[in-house]
Amino acid sequence: MTDRETFLTTARRVIRIEAEALGLLEASLGDSFAEAVEVLLACTGRVIVCGMGKSGHIARKIAATLASTGTPAQFVHPAEASHGDLGMVAQGDVVIVLSNSGETPELADIIAHTRRFAIPMIGVASKPGSTLLTQSDVAIVLPRAEEACGTGVVPTSSTTMALALGDAMAVALMEHRQFTAEHFRTFHPGGKLGAQLSRVRDLMHKGEALPLVAGETRMPEALLEISRKGFGVVGVTGGEGRLAGIITDGDLRRHMDGLLERSAAQVMTNDPRTIGPDALAQEAVAVMNANRITCLFVVDPKGQGEAAGLIHIHDCLRIGLG
């Protein structure tokens, strides 16, 4: 067997063993998990997640996932807690403590702190009789599963289960609170994720920036409005300010003969494609690409048909959509 074949064999074995561990975790979930979610829902402060070593790395990720999905949370390092950071853990908080053995010495002070001040503690460990689980208000026992390292000493399957358990808690809380994509964007304003969840109203040009003329406006003035606003188009309003049409460069070419003698209403394309302000910016990009256009007027479907804004393909490209 070549080295490459050996590497692949090892990788597949590890993934298989960890997948089997996750199956055991799924089957083991019961009332203690549901009780833990109820305790987290009742939390009036922050969820404090603790763990030492590899469990600490998993605890950081769980805290980050909770915080980004609507549950205020932070990681507290158990050793640092013993040297002043216990002040970060207060009444009103809920503490989640991860430890595969449930006997990690560095956890003693934070466990004692939660008992002293009656702070609810959710313990996650693999040994039911361990100090952590016997002291916890809610004890979640990880099923006994083979570590994927082959020696049984490297946290692999156990940390995978703990991470999956944290994700399960976060998603259960999200679904109960009806946490939406719009809420999610509040905590993810930057990067690709934030861009994908941007709304048209977040990007659109409005007010004085909008290129608009009335239907009776003569074309020389309409051309000046196109030049002044710089979008290459102008919207044409009808009665009560309703967006009746749009003039693009294509309309100008089609009406070149006697263009300056015409009114905007005579040149415009009627009933142009529009989009609502609450639509995702991605949807606006899809509409523009499908119709080979570079901008869309924004019309609130709940309104009277007035132009509320304009979104240009460049606005979407600027934030990484396209």
Image (cartoon, helix red, strand yellow):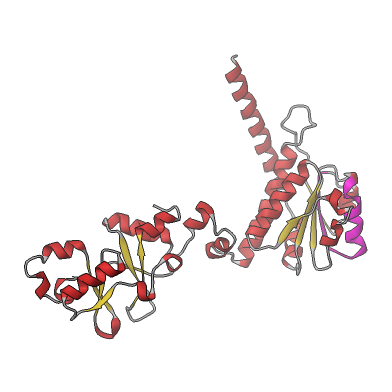
Left or right: 129 as drawn, with respect to 315: right
Please tell me whether residue 228 is drawn above or below residue 293 in the rendered image: below
Give the quarter of the figure containing the N terminus.
top right
As for residue 116 lying within the magenta part, the answer is: yes
Q: Name the one closer to the observer, 134 or 307.
A: 307
In this rendering, the count of numbered labels is 0
Magenta stretch: give its range.
106-126
Residue at 69%, 49% (x, y): give it.
61
Q: Residue furthest top?
A: 1
Percent x, y for residue 137? 85, 59
| Relative horizontal placement of residue 225, taking residue 61 as reference (left or right) | left
Residue at image coords 83%, 65%: 90
Instruction: Residue lying at the far left in this picture: please name it.
Output: 257
Q: Inspect this view and state whether residue 132 appears.
A: yes
Report the side of 264 relative to 105 (left or right). left
Position in image of residue 73 (x %, y %) = 72, 59
Closest to the observer, 292 or 319: 319
- Where's residue 242, x and y in %? 29, 80
The outermost residue toward the bottom is: 240
Residue 135 visible in image = no
Compare residues 304 and 296 and report the one nearer the observer.
296
Residue in view at x 79 percent, y 62 percent: 94
Q: Is residue 75 magenta?
A: no
| Quadrant of res 201 | bottom left
Q: Residue at x 78, y 39 (%)?
A: 144
State which quadrant residue 105 falls in.
top right
Return the x and y of residue 145 as percentages of the image width and height.
75, 37
Specify whether 94 is left or right of 82. Answer: left
Which of the 4 image quarters holds residue 308? bottom left
Between residues 29 and 117, which one lies in front from this camera angle?
Answer: 117
